[in-house]
Image (spheres, grey):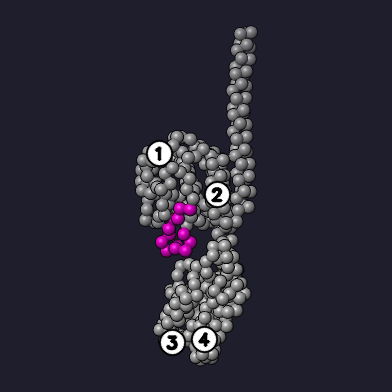
Amino acid sequence: MLEIVGAAIIGAGVAAGVAFLVWGRKCKAEMARNKALMSVIDASQSLGSSTSLESVMSVISKCIKALFSIDTMAVYLVDEENLDEASMLVKGVESIHGGVFIDFNPDKVRSAIGKVLHSRTPMRFDDFSAEAKDESLVPLDKGFRSVMIAPLIFEGRSIGVIFVAHSKPGLYTAETLHSFELLCSQVALAVRNAQLQEGLSALAIRDSLSGLFTHGYFQEHLGKAIIKAKYAKQPVSLLILDVDYFKKVNDNYGHPQGDALLKQLGGVIRSVVRPSDVICRYGGDEFTVTMIDTSQIQASVLAEKIRQTVEEYEFVIGSQIVHITVSGGVSSFPEGCSSKKDLITKADEAMYKAKKSGRNKIKF
Protein backbone atom coordinates (compact mmCIF):
# COMPACT_ATOMS: atom_id res chain seq x y z
CA MET A 1 0.00 0.00 0.00
CA LEU A 2 2.83 2.38 0.90
CA GLU A 3 4.56 1.48 -2.38
CA ILE A 4 1.42 2.40 -4.34
CA VAL A 5 1.08 5.71 -2.49
CA GLY A 6 4.79 6.42 -2.98
CA ALA A 7 4.52 5.71 -6.70
CA ALA A 8 1.49 7.97 -6.94
CA ILE A 9 3.34 10.74 -5.16
CA ILE A 10 6.38 10.31 -7.43
CA GLY A 11 4.11 10.26 -10.51
CA ALA A 12 2.33 13.40 -9.40
CA GLY A 13 5.67 15.06 -8.77
CA VAL A 14 6.94 14.17 -12.24
CA ALA A 15 3.72 15.44 -13.82
CA ALA A 16 3.98 18.65 -11.84
CA GLY A 17 7.59 19.01 -12.87
CA VAL A 18 6.73 18.51 -16.53
CA ALA A 19 3.84 20.98 -16.23
CA PHE A 20 6.19 23.45 -14.57
CA LEU A 21 8.73 23.05 -17.39
CA VAL A 22 5.99 23.53 -20.01
CA TRP A 23 4.70 26.56 -18.14
CA GLY A 24 8.24 27.91 -17.89
CA ARG A 25 8.80 27.46 -21.60
CA LYS A 26 5.48 29.18 -22.36
CA CYS A 27 6.45 32.07 -20.11
CA LYS A 28 9.86 32.26 -21.75
CA ALA A 29 8.27 32.23 -25.21
CA GLU A 30 5.76 34.86 -24.13
CA MET A 31 8.57 37.02 -22.75
CA ALA A 32 10.46 36.62 -26.03
CA ARG A 33 7.36 37.63 -27.98
CA ASN A 34 6.82 40.65 -25.75
CA LYS A 35 10.46 41.64 -26.08
CA ALA A 36 10.24 41.32 -29.87
CA LEU A 37 7.04 43.38 -29.88
CA MET A 38 8.64 46.11 -27.78
CA SER A 39 11.63 46.14 -30.13
CA VAL A 40 9.28 46.54 -33.08
CA ILE A 41 7.50 49.40 -31.29
CA ASP A 42 10.84 51.12 -30.63
CA ALA A 43 11.82 50.64 -34.26
CA SER A 44 8.45 52.06 -35.35
CA GLN A 45 9.12 55.25 -33.41
CA SER A 46 12.47 55.64 -35.18
CA LEU A 47 10.80 55.08 -38.54
CA GLY A 48 8.06 57.56 -37.75
CA SER A 49 10.57 60.36 -37.25
CA SER A 50 12.03 59.90 -40.74
CA THR A 51 10.50 62.12 -43.42
CA SER A 52 12.68 61.46 -46.48
CA LEU A 53 12.88 58.18 -48.35
CA GLU A 54 16.66 58.18 -48.00
CA SER A 55 16.48 58.52 -44.22
CA VAL A 56 13.76 55.85 -44.03
CA MET A 57 16.01 53.40 -45.89
CA SER A 58 18.83 54.10 -43.44
CA VAL A 59 16.55 53.51 -40.42
CA ILE A 60 15.11 50.32 -41.98
CA SER A 61 18.61 48.90 -42.30
CA LYS A 62 19.50 49.73 -38.69
CA CYS A 63 16.23 48.35 -37.30
CA ILE A 64 16.33 45.06 -39.19
CA LYS A 65 19.98 44.42 -38.31
CA ALA A 66 19.25 45.16 -34.66
CA LEU A 67 16.17 42.91 -34.46
CA PHE A 68 17.12 39.94 -36.64
CA SER A 69 20.15 37.84 -37.50
CA ILE A 70 20.80 38.71 -41.14
CA ASP A 71 23.70 39.10 -43.51
CA THR A 72 21.61 40.24 -46.47
CA MET A 73 18.74 42.70 -46.89
CA ALA A 74 17.06 44.10 -49.97
CA VAL A 75 14.20 46.61 -50.03
CA TYR A 76 12.04 46.74 -53.17
CA LEU A 77 9.45 49.42 -53.89
CA VAL A 78 6.81 49.52 -56.63
CA ASP A 79 7.61 52.05 -59.36
CA GLU A 80 4.48 54.20 -59.11
CA GLU A 81 5.45 56.28 -62.13
CA ASN A 82 5.53 53.21 -64.35
CA LEU A 83 2.52 51.19 -63.21
CA ASP A 84 1.88 49.79 -66.69
CA GLU A 85 5.14 47.88 -66.44
CA ALA A 86 4.52 46.91 -62.79
CA SER A 87 8.23 47.38 -62.11
CA MET A 88 9.94 46.68 -58.79
CA LEU A 89 12.81 49.04 -58.01
CA VAL A 90 15.54 48.00 -55.59
CA LYS A 91 15.96 50.91 -53.14
CA GLY A 92 18.22 49.57 -50.43
CA VAL A 93 20.66 46.66 -50.26
CA GLU A 94 22.90 45.42 -47.44
CA SER A 95 24.82 42.40 -48.73
CA ILE A 96 28.18 41.26 -50.05
CA HIS A 97 26.11 40.07 -53.03
CA GLY A 98 24.44 43.46 -53.51
CA GLY A 99 24.86 43.36 -57.27
CA VAL A 100 22.49 40.41 -57.61
CA PHE A 101 19.50 42.50 -56.56
CA ILE A 102 18.22 44.35 -59.61
CA ASP A 103 15.01 46.05 -60.76
CA PHE A 104 12.52 43.61 -62.28
CA ASN A 105 8.96 43.16 -63.50
CA PRO A 106 7.14 40.72 -61.16
CA ASP A 107 4.67 39.88 -63.94
CA LYS A 108 7.47 38.65 -66.19
CA VAL A 109 10.17 37.37 -63.82
CA ARG A 110 9.49 34.38 -61.54
CA SER A 111 10.58 35.18 -58.00
CA ALA A 112 9.47 34.66 -54.42
CA ILE A 113 9.71 38.44 -54.05
CA GLY A 114 7.09 38.88 -56.77
CA LYS A 115 4.88 36.19 -55.20
CA VAL A 116 4.92 38.01 -51.88
CA LEU A 117 4.10 41.31 -53.61
CA HIS A 118 1.03 39.84 -55.36
CA SER A 119 -0.20 37.59 -52.54
CA ARG A 120 0.51 40.17 -49.78
CA THR A 121 1.51 37.18 -47.64
CA PRO A 122 4.98 36.77 -46.05
CA MET A 123 7.14 33.73 -46.80
CA ARG A 124 9.82 31.92 -44.79
CA PHE A 125 12.46 29.48 -46.03
CA ASP A 126 14.69 27.23 -43.94
CA ASP A 127 16.93 26.68 -46.97
CA PHE A 128 16.15 29.06 -49.80
CA SER A 129 18.72 27.59 -52.17
CA ALA A 130 17.07 24.16 -51.89
CA GLU A 131 13.41 25.15 -51.61
CA ALA A 132 13.04 27.99 -54.13
CA LYS A 133 13.32 25.84 -57.22
CA ASP A 134 11.47 28.21 -59.60
CA GLU A 135 13.42 31.30 -58.50
CA SER A 136 14.83 33.20 -61.49
CA LEU A 137 15.70 36.55 -59.88
CA VAL A 138 17.75 35.83 -56.76
CA PRO A 139 20.69 33.48 -57.62
CA LEU A 140 20.49 30.20 -55.71
CA ASP A 141 24.28 29.77 -55.62
CA LYS A 142 25.03 32.79 -53.41
CA GLY A 143 24.46 31.09 -50.06
CA PHE A 144 21.05 32.54 -49.23
CA ARG A 145 19.78 29.84 -46.82
CA SER A 146 17.46 31.20 -44.10
CA VAL A 147 15.18 33.69 -45.81
CA MET A 148 12.18 35.85 -44.84
CA ILE A 149 10.21 37.93 -47.34
CA ALA A 150 7.38 40.25 -46.28
CA PRO A 151 5.21 42.73 -48.16
CA LEU A 152 4.94 46.43 -47.40
CA ILE A 153 1.18 47.01 -47.33
CA PHE A 154 -0.44 50.43 -47.28
CA GLU A 155 -4.24 50.74 -47.36
CA GLY A 156 -4.58 47.15 -48.55
CA ARG A 157 -2.13 47.56 -51.43
CA SER A 158 1.42 46.20 -51.71
CA ILE A 159 3.81 49.10 -52.23
CA GLY A 160 6.97 47.05 -51.81
CA VAL A 161 8.72 44.00 -50.37
CA ILE A 162 11.63 43.39 -47.99
CA PHE A 163 13.91 40.36 -48.46
CA VAL A 164 16.25 39.30 -45.63
CA ALA A 165 18.56 36.30 -45.49
CA HIS A 166 21.32 34.53 -43.58
CA SER A 167 23.86 31.97 -44.76
CA LYS A 168 22.92 29.65 -41.87
CA PRO A 169 19.88 27.39 -42.59
CA GLY A 170 16.85 26.99 -40.32
CA LEU A 171 17.50 30.22 -38.46
CA TYR A 172 14.05 31.84 -38.63
CA THR A 173 10.96 30.53 -36.85
CA ALA A 174 7.28 31.31 -37.31
CA GLU A 175 7.60 33.75 -34.40
CA THR A 176 10.53 35.47 -36.10
CA LEU A 177 8.50 35.82 -39.28
CA HIS A 178 5.58 37.27 -37.30
CA SER A 179 7.85 39.93 -35.75
CA PHE A 180 9.32 40.66 -39.17
CA GLU A 181 5.83 41.08 -40.61
CA LEU A 182 4.90 43.49 -37.81
CA LEU A 183 7.97 45.58 -38.47
CA CYS A 184 7.24 45.65 -42.21
CA SER A 185 3.75 47.00 -41.53
CA GLN A 186 5.38 49.95 -39.78
CA VAL A 187 7.98 50.29 -42.54
CA ALA A 188 5.15 50.57 -45.10
CA LEU A 189 3.67 53.53 -43.21
CA ALA A 190 7.06 55.24 -43.00
CA VAL A 191 7.81 54.64 -46.69
CA ARG A 192 4.43 55.94 -47.83
CA ASN A 193 4.72 58.98 -45.59
CA ALA A 194 8.16 59.76 -47.02
CA GLN A 195 6.87 59.33 -50.57
CA LEU A 196 3.99 61.69 -49.88
CA GLN A 197 6.28 64.24 -48.24
CA GLU A 198 8.66 64.17 -51.20
CA GLY A 199 5.71 64.50 -53.55
CA LEU A 200 4.45 67.56 -51.67
CA SER A 201 7.93 69.09 -51.71
CA ALA A 202 8.09 68.60 -55.46
CA LEU A 203 4.66 70.19 -55.88
CA ALA A 204 5.70 73.16 -53.77
CA ILE A 205 8.59 74.06 -56.09
CA ARG A 206 6.92 73.14 -59.40
CA ASP A 207 4.59 75.33 -61.41
CA SER A 208 1.29 73.47 -61.87
CA LEU A 209 0.86 74.65 -65.47
CA SER A 210 4.29 74.18 -67.03
CA GLY A 211 5.89 71.67 -64.66
CA LEU A 212 8.90 74.00 -64.42
CA PHE A 213 10.29 75.41 -61.18
CA THR A 214 8.39 78.25 -59.52
CA HIS A 215 9.36 81.90 -58.99
CA GLY A 216 10.09 81.13 -55.32
CA TYR A 217 12.45 78.31 -56.23
CA PHE A 218 14.14 80.56 -58.79
CA GLN A 219 14.91 83.17 -56.14
CA GLU A 220 16.28 80.60 -53.71
CA HIS A 221 18.32 78.69 -56.30
CA LEU A 222 19.83 81.83 -57.84
CA GLY A 223 20.85 83.13 -54.41
CA LYS A 224 22.66 79.87 -53.61
CA ALA A 225 24.26 79.83 -57.06
CA ILE A 226 25.70 83.31 -56.52
CA ILE A 227 27.19 82.32 -53.16
CA LYS A 228 28.79 79.17 -54.62
CA ALA A 229 30.08 81.15 -57.61
CA LYS A 230 31.86 83.62 -55.30
CA TYR A 231 33.79 80.83 -53.58
CA ALA A 232 34.43 78.82 -56.74
CA LYS A 233 35.33 81.94 -58.73
CA GLN A 234 32.98 80.83 -61.51
CA PRO A 235 30.50 82.91 -63.54
CA VAL A 236 26.72 82.59 -63.28
CA SER A 237 24.47 83.83 -66.07
CA LEU A 238 20.76 84.53 -66.16
CA LEU A 239 18.35 84.66 -69.10
CA ILE A 240 14.86 86.17 -68.77
CA LEU A 241 12.50 85.40 -71.67
CA ASP A 242 9.15 86.97 -72.48
CA VAL A 243 6.63 85.91 -75.15
CA ASP A 244 6.10 88.59 -77.76
CA TYR A 245 2.48 89.78 -78.15
CA PHE A 246 1.20 87.09 -75.79
CA LYS A 247 -1.90 89.20 -75.06
CA LYS A 248 -2.98 88.67 -78.66
CA VAL A 249 -2.83 84.89 -78.15
CA ASN A 250 -5.19 85.13 -75.18
CA ASP A 251 -7.47 87.61 -76.97
CA ASN A 252 -7.70 85.51 -80.15
CA TYR A 253 -7.77 82.00 -78.72
CA GLY A 254 -8.76 82.36 -75.05
CA HIS A 255 -6.83 81.90 -71.83
CA PRO A 256 -7.01 78.07 -71.76
CA GLN A 257 -5.31 77.93 -75.17
CA GLY A 258 -2.81 80.52 -73.98
CA ASP A 259 -1.99 78.28 -71.02
CA ALA A 260 -1.57 75.33 -73.40
CA LEU A 261 0.89 77.37 -75.46
CA LEU A 262 2.93 78.30 -72.37
CA LYS A 263 3.13 74.63 -71.42
CA GLN A 264 4.43 73.80 -74.90
CA LEU A 265 6.92 76.67 -74.68
CA GLY A 266 8.30 75.29 -71.43
CA GLY A 267 8.93 71.99 -73.20
CA VAL A 268 10.68 73.73 -76.12
CA ILE A 269 13.02 75.61 -73.77
CA ARG A 270 13.73 72.39 -71.87
CA SER A 271 14.70 70.64 -75.11
CA VAL A 272 17.40 73.23 -75.84
CA VAL A 273 19.09 73.89 -72.49
CA ARG A 274 21.73 71.74 -70.84
CA PRO A 275 21.05 69.32 -67.94
CA SER A 276 22.77 71.68 -65.50
CA ASP A 277 20.61 74.68 -66.47
CA VAL A 278 17.60 75.48 -64.28
CA ILE A 279 14.39 76.65 -66.00
CA CYS A 280 11.70 78.48 -64.03
CA ARG A 281 8.39 80.07 -64.83
CA TYR A 282 9.09 83.60 -63.62
CA GLY A 283 5.50 84.72 -63.88
CA GLY A 284 2.79 85.07 -66.52
CA ASP A 285 4.49 84.54 -69.89
CA GLU A 286 8.04 85.08 -68.57
CA PHE A 287 10.60 82.32 -68.08
CA THR A 288 14.11 82.26 -66.65
CA VAL A 289 17.12 80.06 -67.31
CA THR A 290 19.90 80.06 -64.70
CA MET A 291 23.24 78.89 -66.10
CA ILE A 292 26.01 77.81 -63.70
CA ASP A 293 29.67 78.26 -64.72
CA THR A 294 28.57 80.07 -67.87
CA SER A 295 29.99 83.37 -69.12
CA GLN A 296 27.89 86.11 -70.67
CA ILE A 297 29.02 85.19 -74.18
CA GLN A 298 28.24 81.50 -73.63
CA ALA A 299 24.86 82.38 -72.15
CA SER A 300 24.05 84.66 -75.09
CA VAL A 301 24.83 81.85 -77.54
CA LEU A 302 22.49 79.49 -75.69
CA ALA A 303 19.81 82.19 -75.43
CA GLU A 304 20.01 82.81 -79.17
CA LYS A 305 19.62 79.09 -79.79
CA ILE A 306 16.45 79.09 -77.64
CA ARG A 307 15.10 82.15 -79.48
CA GLN A 308 15.70 80.58 -82.87
CA THR A 309 14.18 77.23 -81.84
CA VAL A 310 11.03 78.95 -80.54
CA GLU A 311 10.71 81.00 -83.75
CA GLU A 312 10.85 77.85 -85.90
CA TYR A 313 8.64 75.69 -83.69
CA GLU A 314 5.06 74.88 -84.70
CA PHE A 315 2.86 75.41 -81.65
CA VAL A 316 -0.57 73.76 -81.59
CA ILE A 317 -3.55 75.81 -80.44
CA GLY A 318 -6.77 73.85 -80.79
CA SER A 319 -6.79 72.69 -84.42
CA GLN A 320 -4.38 75.39 -85.61
CA ILE A 321 -0.62 75.68 -85.99
CA VAL A 322 0.78 79.01 -84.81
CA HIS A 323 4.23 80.58 -84.61
CA ILE A 324 5.42 82.83 -81.80
CA THR A 325 8.63 84.65 -80.92
CA VAL A 326 10.34 85.54 -77.67
CA SER A 327 12.52 88.41 -76.50
CA GLY A 328 15.25 87.84 -73.95
CA GLY A 329 17.79 89.56 -71.75
CA VAL A 330 21.06 88.09 -70.49
CA SER A 331 23.13 89.20 -67.50
CA SER A 332 26.15 87.60 -65.82
CA PHE A 333 27.91 87.53 -62.47
CA PRO A 334 30.51 88.83 -61.88
CA GLU A 335 30.56 90.39 -65.37
CA GLY A 336 28.66 93.63 -64.81
CA CYS A 337 26.71 92.36 -61.78
CA SER A 338 27.69 92.13 -58.13
CA SER A 339 24.60 90.56 -56.51
CA LYS A 340 21.49 88.49 -57.14
CA LYS A 341 19.31 91.59 -57.27
CA ASP A 342 21.69 93.22 -59.72
CA LEU A 343 21.69 90.10 -61.91
CA ILE A 344 17.88 90.03 -62.13
CA THR A 345 17.60 93.78 -62.73
CA LYS A 346 20.18 93.78 -65.55
CA ALA A 347 18.60 90.75 -67.29
CA ASP A 348 15.16 92.35 -67.00
CA GLU A 349 16.43 95.65 -68.44
CA ALA A 350 18.12 93.82 -71.32
CA MET A 351 14.89 91.94 -72.05
CA TYR A 352 12.89 95.19 -72.29
CA LYS A 353 15.62 96.63 -74.51
CA ALA A 354 15.09 93.66 -76.85
CA LYS A 355 11.36 94.35 -76.95
CA LYS A 356 11.79 98.07 -77.64
CA SER A 357 14.23 97.37 -80.47
CA GLY A 358 11.77 95.27 -82.47
CA ARG A 359 11.23 92.06 -80.42
CA ASN A 360 12.38 88.51 -81.31
CA LYS A 361 15.87 89.44 -80.10
CA ILE A 362 18.34 88.64 -77.32
CA LYS A 363 20.11 91.57 -75.62
CA PHE A 364 22.71 91.79 -72.87
The residue to which callout 3 is attached is 323
Amino acid type shown at disc 2: Ser
Q: Quadrant of residue 126?
A: top left
The residue to which callout 1 is attached is 143
The residue to which callout 4 is attached is 354
Residue at 49 percent across and 88 percent down: it is 359
The residue to which callout 2 is attached is 58
Q: Earlier in the sequence, mark 2 or mark 4?
A: 2
Observer-side mark, 1 or 3, equals 3
Please state the horizontal and vertical placement of residue 248, each as a whole percent of the image. Answer: 52, 91
Observer-side mark, 4 or 1, equals 4
| Distance from Cα at disc 3 to Cα at disc 4 | 19 Å
Q: Secondary structure at mark 2?
A: helix
Amino acid type shown at disc 3: His
Observer-side mark, 2 or 4, equals 4
| Distance from Cα at disc 4 to Cα at disc 1 | 69 Å
Q: From which residue to which does the magenta span run? A: 79-91
Quarter of the figure that contains the N terminus = top right
Contact check, label 4 and label 1, Cβ < 8 Å: no
Amino acid type shown at disc 4: Ala
Contact check, label 1 and label 2, Cβ < 8 Å: no
